[in-house]
């Protein structure tokens, strides 16, 4: 079991106020690592440091070292030579609220390929189908790919967002409370999906639900006041 | 309904009725004063005829052409400037540098038009004269450039406002998928904001058509159909300002109402178009 992510001495400041302090952790490849803790303790911020999504936030600053292994080599994701767009293609993210773009189901899934210029490749449709199958959505939408993605139910929208993140075959997937806005049935479906996804991807999951963490996580850690206070 | 609510509602209704009444009243006033022209069948002729008082021709066709040429050129010049600044302020650097630049743009909206006119007369007109080596430099190009600069702040602020309508979760989704700024603009912002942006364009066009001073100071004021952007031209508003001192009963003076009604119709058409687009945007 090799580590995929190594975080050492990570501090995060917002307007000079510390949000994360001296975070040190390792995430093992092809596992689900859950981060729990009360609201406002820095869980989502921790995820955002891993794909540098915080960089658009004015007044935010990060210190410390985050290494992610791509292939055989660990890479410092804050290395000036490492392009953020490349990082985000390898480290996908799914948000708490499903955020389908205002376009068709097909266009939503193919959107990441459009960003890389691969959407006109012959295998684009096949990749869309594969991503939708991996997210257990294909059977439900295969006859309505041209419909607006916002017409899907909340659970379907969240699976669509996971499929959209998966189409680029990310090596790491960050999940920020992906089931908290969904009903129990949809939440369970997402959990089953994540267990499948972890076979090919390393997952870091922020969750409020301890029972969910116990069901699907291989490892867990509790974050309180910006520090890891407990690991199991 | 309690008294306060009733009074508030009545006050708002009163304000709406008053402003609508004033707007329609102005149109009615112009139609009444232009009635003799309608009665004698001169109104429609005046819209297309040239202006040649010596030959008894008092058409405002050249002024309508001049207005449309200068306002269109101003919008064409303003679009790239406004889009660039709006993207910087609204998308690339929404805080920090962008905020400072936005404050400068907001300050520009309060600069009196006559200042733009002076800059035009003393800087732009000699530059155009030198670069294109012909005429006085007072021409459609000079007026269009200066008006383009004048309407840019309005257009920039409208564009920035349009960008803020884009839901944050769409931008987050694009960011998380690795979209760069240009991709985010073309794939997320533009499809969402274009209708609102077009509304801004139309209203800015109206602003350019309605401006008097810049056209009066640097367009050359020749009451003839222009053939190129280096030709002088007279706008409807400048014509009104130049003719206002004529004898009330003269036919020259009556052309003011033709100008007024033409301007009213053109700006009204623009507003209706903008509202129509806005409605479709919300549908």
Image (tube, helix red, strand yellow):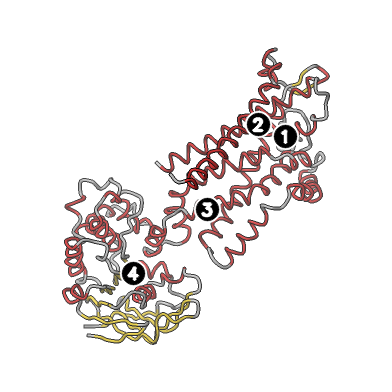
Give the residue number, with chain letter if any, for mark 1: B237
Give the residue number, with chain letter if any, for mark 4: A90
Give the residue number, with chain letter if any, for mark 3: B161
Are dots 1 and 3 on a single chain? yes
Are dots 4 and 1 on a single chain? no
Are dots 3 and 2 on a single chain? yes
Q: What is the x, y in percent for residue A180?
A: 26, 66
Q: Residue B96 sits in which quadrant?
A: bottom right
Tell me how far mark 2 sits from mark 4, CA to CA: 57 Å
Tell me how far mark 2 sits from mark 1, CA to CA: 8 Å
Tags 1 and 3 in contact by the CB under 8 Å rule?
no
Tell me how far mark 3 sits from mark 4, CA to CA: 33 Å
Residue B103 vertical placement versus B72 (above, below)? below
Tags 3 and 2 in contact by the CB under 8 Å rule?
no
Give the residue number, with chain letter if any, for mark 2: B263
Q: What is the x, y in percent for residue B192?
A: 43, 49
Residue located farthest toward the top when viewing the structure as drawn:
B40
At x 31% / y 62%, what residue is drawn? A97
Q: Quadrant of the N terminus of chain B?
A: top left
Q: What is the x, y in percent for residue B241?
A: 77, 34
Residue B45 vertical placement versus B2 (above, below)? above
Tags 2 and 1 in contact by the CB under 8 Å rule?
yes
Are dots 2 and 1 on a single chain? yes
For mark 3, does the 10 Å Cα neighbourhood hold few (<14), some (14 to 19), or many (20 or more) residues? some
At x 64% / y 56%, what residue is drawn? B105
At x 55% / y 60%, what residue is drawn? B88
Tags 4 and 1 in contact by the CB under 8 Å rule?
no
Query: Counting residues from the N terminus, which is met first, the one under dot 1 or under dot 3?
Result: 3
Task: Write down the chain letter for disc 4.
Answer: A
> Quick one: SS at disc 4?
helix
Q: What is the x, y in percent for residue A137?
A: 20, 56
């Amino acid at each position: 079991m090799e580590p995929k992510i190594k975080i050492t001495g990570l501090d995060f400041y917002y307007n000079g106020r510390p949000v994360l302090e001296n975070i040190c952790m390792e995430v093992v490849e092809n596992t689900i690592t859950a981060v729990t803790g009360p609201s406002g303790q820095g869980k989502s911020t921790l995820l955002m440091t891993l794909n540098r999504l915080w960089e658009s936030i004015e007044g935010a600053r990060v210190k410390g070292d985050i290494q992610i292994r791509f292939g055989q080599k660990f890479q410092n994701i804050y290395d000036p030579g490492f392009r953020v767009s490349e990082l985000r293609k390898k480290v996908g993210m799914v948000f708490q609220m499903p955020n389908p773009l205002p376009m068709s189901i097909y266009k939503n899934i193919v959107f990441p390929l459009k960003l890389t210029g691969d959407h006109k490749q012959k295998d684009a449709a096949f990749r869309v189908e594969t991503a939708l199958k991996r997210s257990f959505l294909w059977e439900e939408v295969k006859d309505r790919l041209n419909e607006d993605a916002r017409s899907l139910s909340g659970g379907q929208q969240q699976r669509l967002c996971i499929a959209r993140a998966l189409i680029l075959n990310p090596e790491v997937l960050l999940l920020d409370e992906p089931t908290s806005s969904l009903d129990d049935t949809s939440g369970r479906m997402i959990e089953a999906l994540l267990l499948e996804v972890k076979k090919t991807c390393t997952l870091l999951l922020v969750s409020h639900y301890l029972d969910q963490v116990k069901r699907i996580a291989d490892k867990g850690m509790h974050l309180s006041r910006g520090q890891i206070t407990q690991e199991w | 309904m309690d008294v306060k609510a009733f009074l508030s509602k009545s006050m708002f209704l009163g304000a709406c009725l008053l402003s609508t009444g004033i707007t329609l009243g102005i149109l009615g006033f112009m139609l009444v004063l232009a009635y003799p022209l309608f009665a004698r069948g001169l109104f429609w002729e005046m819209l297309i005829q040239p202006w040649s008082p010596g030959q008894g021709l008092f058409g405002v066709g050249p002024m309508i052409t001049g207005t449309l040429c200068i306002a269109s050129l101003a919008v064409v010049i303003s679009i790239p400037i406004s889009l660039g600044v709006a993207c910087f302020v609204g998308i690339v650097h929404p805080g920090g540098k962008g905020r400072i630049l936005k404050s400068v743009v907001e300050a520009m909206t309060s600069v009196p038009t006559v200042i733009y006119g002076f800059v035009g007369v003393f800087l732009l007109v000699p530059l155009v004269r030198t670069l294109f080596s012909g005429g006085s430099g007072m021409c459609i190009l000079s007026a269009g450039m200066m008006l383009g600069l004048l309407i840019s702040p309005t257009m920039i602020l409208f564009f920035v406002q349009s960008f803020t309508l884009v839901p944050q979760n769409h931008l987050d989704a694009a960011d998380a998928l690795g979209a760069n700024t240009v991709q985010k603009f073309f794939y997320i912002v533009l499809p969402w904001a274009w209708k609102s942006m077009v509304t801004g364009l139309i209203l800015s066009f109206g602003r350019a058509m309605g401006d008097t001073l810049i056209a009066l100071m640097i367009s050359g004021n020749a009451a003839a159909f222009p053939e190129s952007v280096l030709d002088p031209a007279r706008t409807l508003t400048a014509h009104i300002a130049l003719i206002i001192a004529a004898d009330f009963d003269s036919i020259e003076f009556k052309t003011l109402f033709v100008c007024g009604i033409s301007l009213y119709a053109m700006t009204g058409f623009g507003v209706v178009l903008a509202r129509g687009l806005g409605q479709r945007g919300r549908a």
